[in-house]
Image (spheres, coloured by chain):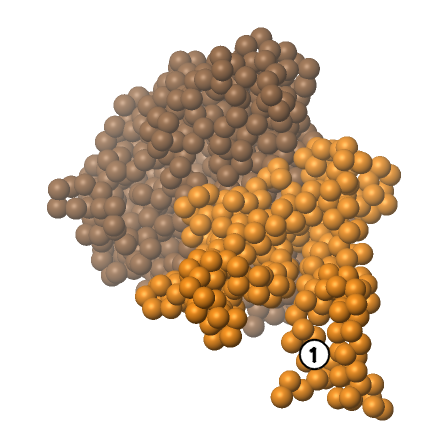
Amino acid sequence: MADGTPTHLEAWNLQLAEFEESSRVGPARAALGRMRRNKLLLLGTALGLIVLGAGVLGPIISGADPAFQSFASTLLPPGSEGYLLGTDHLGRDMAVRVFIGIRVSLMVAAGVTLLSLVLGLVLGMFGGFLGGWADRTIRGAVDFVWGFPLILVAVLFAGGLGEGLFPVILAVGLVNTAAIARVVRGEVLSLSEREFVEAARAGGLSTARIMWRHLFPNILAPALVLASYYVAVAIIAEAALSFIGLGAQPPTPSLGGMVSDGRNFLQQNHWGATIPGITIVLLVLAVSLIGDGLRDVFDPRLRHEAKGVDEE
Amino acid sequence: MGNSWMDPDLGPEVAELTEQYMAKKIGRRQFMKRMGVAGVGVAAAASILAACGGDDEPDTTAATAAATTATTAAASDGGADTTQAAAPAETTATTEAAMMGPVSGGTLREGYNRDVSKHDPATTNWYDPAFFAIYEAILSNDPSGATVPQFASGYSASDDGLEYRFTIPEGKLSHSGGTINAEMVAEFYRSIQTYSFIAGLAAPVDTYEADGNEVVMKMKNPWVGALGPHKTGYWRIVNINTWKEHSITADGELNAASTYGTELADGTGPFTHEEWVPGSHVLVRRWDDYPGSETPFFDNKGPAYLDAIRWTVITEAGQRATQLENGDIDTLINPAHQDIGRLESNSDLTVIRHPEWSGYHLAMNRDYPEYFGDRLTRQGLSHALDREGMVQAILFGNGAATYGPFPTTDRNYESAVEQYNQFDLDLANQKLDRAGWTMGSGGVRERDGVRFEFRYLVEDETVQKSVAEAVQAQFANVGVRANLDVVDRALAFEQQSGPGRDSVEMSLFFWLWPIPLDVLILFGGSQFIPVPNFSHAVEPRVDDAIASWQTSATEAQAQAAASQFQLAWAEELPYIPLMNQNATFVHNNKVHGWQPFVWNLYPYYNDTWIEA
């Protein structure tokens, strides 16, 4: 077509070629091939590796203490002697603090994702497949949590457990669990009507076995794709909570906390806020691109929609 | 009776000039000029002038205080410090409107760097600028620091220093319309003695009684500092009937659920309580029935010019200057230190700086003797702190390091304290080693199986957080881990105030008071455990010095007691002193008659007006 959108026939031929390729090389290699062809995924991965490398290797290479203060060297801009990214208001090395901040963000994101994925899968599968009171209870609980703003949940947890990363992981994880559980439940409800599940039931398989052997593999991919989206959400949430003082506590640096500190010195040295701000953007961008790419690769329905195939 | 404010011990030249001025033989300008030749400071001369009944010429002189630096872009040449009070014409009369004189109306929008306190002098743990609008004290400090009447029309002291009499004029009212007489003032003062946690400030006072139209204060012993507390926010005059109705239960106990100071206040000042919203703002409105002020240095003796005053809480330091520059507020108390230079270069604003009687201190709860029980450990911690560096980095030089409890600018400052608490990492490590602390796992010291790791509380305010973080990192340098816990103001006070180990191990606190020793008595005296002696420290040397201070009948005795107190504090370290900051006030040049000065902490609002 003139506007570049593939015609139905072109899209169909593309899918056919992919199907033939996957038949020839196997699904895993086919997926890998699709990943290699997905430019956004590659870009996101490259960006992610750079940021991840900075977070993991930066502090090791620099060897500096993120809490070390030099009162004679405060608010230095990037490129100042001995300070790659300058210093903050207490004369601390911004580069080391950003590296550690990335590490903290990723740690929180990993914790949140693991928690929300496991809980979301379990609750969604049980609710969707068992139905009845179990479904009503889980759905009620999920709706209850879903109704609370993240900040409020985080404040409640911080009130009970004190400020720090653990309450942040719990709060964000809980809210994300609700999101994942809702999607998983919907998928399970749909899958429950499919023939292979009916066949399994007719074959006398136990509920647990059906869930584990037949439902779980089918919902894992969309759940992972969804979780990848919530990694970005978790990073932003951690930054936001640290910005208002509920996240990582001093002397542990966090990107949100650094933005918060830096905004008081925008007139003197704006880099104190902009560098961690840009880092958050890059981190979220990398994770989002990876998430979108994975969705394109592993979620055929969305992939087909994206390529202009009318499902009907 | 002697020592009346009406009979200052003036030199003959000053007295003669005053007589000539009062006889209208010389004008105001000539008076001021010749006072300067006679060696009298601008603020002191202004005070005398005001006491003489003012003048028909526009008076802006008193806008600046003794020891105050007021600068505008034109006057300061880049904001360099000066020790001279800025010339009146440079600080205020900037427009034709200003030359026309005060106009009524408008709401003054003031930015405040702290969260707001309960508007109840008897039960609050801090008093805010609104106290200077809602309430009046029986006496006040004038711009030169001299004691002058405020609610009282005059006062006197007996020659033996055992009795003070304050004259209460007839016709004094409170906001609710009730008459305030001497008996009611005396009864409110007795209530402070009974209920206020701050009553120890005036421990040498024995009784308050009424005698006709006079409040009679009888002392247990002569004390040169007797009037000091009575000029502060905690002794501001409240309609005792209203206060009792809300604040005292039928059993005579303090009503913890009282709404006095939050939903209502019944003072005698020129403004009435309207709204009180913690974390947000306070609003007061002009009291049109204000019967007038006895304060000699106010030009405006009648109802205030302003319709209302709204204080906005701006705890984020970086936001304060921005709000002033954007026109969201008209006046500002304590901008971020890093923004002061920029504000000084703004020709639309006037910046007033003066040394502040305040201090950042670290409280160490002695009910955790495993950490802070021995002096050697406390001294080791203190030597680990680079105070000069913190002053430069955090206060941008707008303050001074303190090695003892007093700010260096206080008249009773004892410089010998500087032999203690100097920054010396080697000495810090040596003292901690000698105290038995050995380096353990993770770079944290241990003693008798106890890791030197504890909770360290700080109030959620930008500068305090920076100070706390700086201290935390410096403690880490000597193997001490202080786990910072940032909480809001009310929670901070609550967690500092518990008995024994119910109170946090270490906390940072900031005090602000016109007479350091008066307030530090509360923080250091053993009779004030657990609150406000947050350290729960019993230091006999400190207690002895307090006793000496509160029985000092002469200035010389007071100075000796103050020195004794400072040296004991600096060596025994019931608290670790850190630094004090300068007070900074900024106003839009369309605001006039806003007079912050060092002796009263905050400005009065009787003379304040805004150009239309």
Say which of B470 and B85 sits in front: B470
Count of numbered marks:
1
Q: Relative to A238, say whether B35 is above or below.
A: above
Chain B pictured colour: brown
Q: Relative to B566, say whether B153 is above or below.
A: below
Q: Residue furthest top?
A: B434
Location of residue B358 in the rendering, given as x and y in whole percent from the top left corner: 53, 35
Location of residue A276 in the rendering, given as x and y in whole percent from the top left corner: 71, 52
Residue A299 image-quadrant placement: bottom right
Instruction: From the viewer's perspective, tell me whether residue B428 is left or right of residue A134.
Output: right
Give neighbour class at mark 1: few <14, some 14-19, many 20+ (Cα, 10 Å).
some
Say which of A1 and B194 sits in front: A1
Residue A11 image-quadrant placement: bottom right
The residue lying at 57 percent from left, 69 percent from top is B611
- Whether residue B295 can be seen here: no
Instruction: From the viewer's perspective, tell me whether residue B485 is left or right of residue A306.
Output: left
Which SS class for mark 1? helix
- Whether residue A132 can be seen here: yes
State the quadrant of the C terminus of chain B.
bottom right
The residue lying at 80 percent from left, 56 percent from top is A46
Q: Relative to B149, say whether B551 is above or below.
A: above
Q: Amino acid at mark 1?
A: His
Residue B229 image-quadrant placement: top left
Disc 1 chain ID: A
Chain A pictured colour: orange
Location of residue B343 in the rendering, given as x and y in whole percent from the top left corner: 69, 54
The residue lying at 78 percent from left, 73 percent from top is A20
Q: Which residue is mark 1?
A: A304
